[in-house]
Image (tube, grey):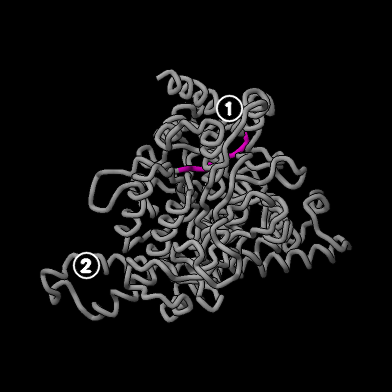
Amino acid sequence: MNVLGFLLVFTLQMASANSPYNKNHTFFNDSTKKLKAPLNWFNLDLETDNVRGISTEKAYKEILSNKSSKTVVVAVIDSGIDIEHEDLEGKIWVNTNEIVGNGIDDDGNGYIDDVFGWNFIGGKDGSHVGHDTYEITREYKRLHAKYKGKTLNNVSKKEKEEFNYYTKVKEDFLDNVKQYRETLSNIETFQDNYNKAIKLMKIYLEVDEVTAENIKNVNSEDPKIQGAVQLLNYAFSNGIDENQFKEIINYYTEGIEYGYNTDFEPRTIVGDNFEDKKEKFYGNPDVEGPDAEHGTHVAGIIGANRDNELGIGGVADNVRIMALRAVPNGDERDKDIANAIYYAVDNGAKIINMSFGKSYSPSKVVVDKAVKYAQKKGVLIIHAAGNDAENIDETANFPTATFEGKKKEAQNWLEIGASSWVTDNNFVASFSNYGKTKVDIFAPGVDIFSSIPGSEYKENSGTSMAAPVVSGVAALLMSYYPELSAADVKDILVQSAIKYDDDVNKPGGGNTPFNSLSKTGGIINAYEAVKMAEQKTLQIRKK
């Protein structure tokens, strides 16, 4: 029981690490699960509120209250956005040169009826790619067809490098499939034991509901009762319940059925020539798609209405969210991400939020070209570091700032780890990736309350939530200090971070100084960033 219990808790913590689009909410929320996060905590202040927020409210109150601002467009490349959410009213970008639903490309940009953005994983008939395979599955399928039954000794010299790559892909793919099946079996076993324990304790206690409170004083010599209490105490203390079981079992089942299924091929829905990486004009204008929870949550963090007394207040108050659907329930495809970046840049976005990632990127050069284009046009890219609790200095989480085959890095890129609100040594999210040379900065990403489809709200966790916090601060600076370039904003965000050298619980286990987990050793802070932006703007105006 204890082994399975530990396995389940670890799996619940880490499940989103392998999540298809870095869905980035953990199925049980981090080491702070027993504590309740203050509402809208990510905007609060450490000194005033005793939580490690980014001091957004302080910045507005003490510096920005009487200042004018300029609207800034932030592109959210994600799973889709509920553009009719009550807390996003007036916050969605509108292409005013396009007429809704007339079937004509009014502005001549190649995309018909792209009023609110574009869906790069939809079909011309209005259909959608919901689930897709993982990139490793696609690579295994492609290479297995070429090298099945071959060894290093019977491939050509020209093929040896690719064959070695295939060997690694095959090993990883088969290991992952095995792990998914074994984990699913273990979780189902634990769920069965949990249900039996609940049933037994209902009879023993003569109650309709079993809680942590009513089993606290159970004192029985019956080994079955003792075992049930032990299991349930373990489950309750770690926040495990039927909802977690349902969600995690569904996650692994879908992974096996879709993500690691070499026979599953949904791309025909899109109808593009997938091998033509330069092709742009495919998809449809439905930016919500079949599952827009993740993208809607991200959009709310960036720019949910701060004045309507509904739900939450986003970080930026004068922002428009450009909705770009390119991330399915499965791994995103490089071609779609590149095209989404081009679209964002060409249609006026100043910031691009990318809360997704994967372990393989066979067409990385295509994404790199789009990133270079964004850099040339002065567009800032904010990317989530991922939820594997790994050092991405050593293990890549694509897309990356480092260009393929070169040591050069994109200068318009920020890589974001996730932090929590607590003030003790648990303030680094247990799931967050890190890296002294690859992660730039940390930001709030645990139990973030934000918008989800249907004008509802929910707490989610992940570096996916941390990235839009940074995008929101970047938009805030560009909005109130329009003289600042993307390079200026990046420098300010990094330099104004609140630095910590405390020892913290390291993601994946052990202890380490916080400043060893990123380039800055800091957590983003809107108040300090605004103060620095004030100074920088004065310098620019004096020139």
Q: How many marks?
A: 2
- Please name the residue shown 57% across and 44% down the image: 445
- Please name the residue shown 29% across and 77% down the image: 144
Image-based side of 393 in relation to 524, left or right? left
Q: Which residue is mark 2?
A: 162
Query: Is label 1 in a helix, a strand or a loop?
Result: helix
The nearer-to-camera label among 2 and 1 is 1
Q: Which residues are magenta?
A: 416-423
Query: Is 421 one of the magenta-colored residues?
Result: yes
Q: Nearer the viewer, residue 454 or 90?
A: 90
Q: Which residue is mark 1?
A: 527
- Disc 2 or 1, which lies upstream in sequence? 2
- Label disc, if present, on residue 221 of the rendered structure: none
The quarter of the picture where the C terminus appears is top left
Would residue 316 be seen by someone viewing this image from the given angle? Answer: yes
User: Which amino acid type is shown beneath numbered disc 2?
Assistant: Glu
The residue most toward the right is 206
The Cα atoms of the two marked residues, 2 and 1, are separated by 50 Å
The quarter of the picture where the N terminus appears is bottom right
Residue 87 percent across, percent down from the top left: 70, 50
In the image, residue 318 sits, relative to residue 148, either above or below, namely above
Q: Nearer the viewer, residue 196 or 224?
A: 196
Quadrant of the image occupied by residue 290: bottom right
Would residue 9 be seen by someone viewing this image from the given angle? Answer: no
The residue most toward the left is 157
- Please name the residue shown 58% across and 55% down the image: 94
Q: Nearer the viewer, residue 349 or 207?
A: 349
In the image, residue 365 sits, relative to residue 113, either above or below, namely above
Query: Is label 2 in a helix, a strand or a loop?
Result: helix
Residue 20 percent across, percent down from the top left: 49, 63
Residue 90 percent across, percent down from the top left: 67, 50
Residue 487 percent across, percent down from the top left: 40, 35
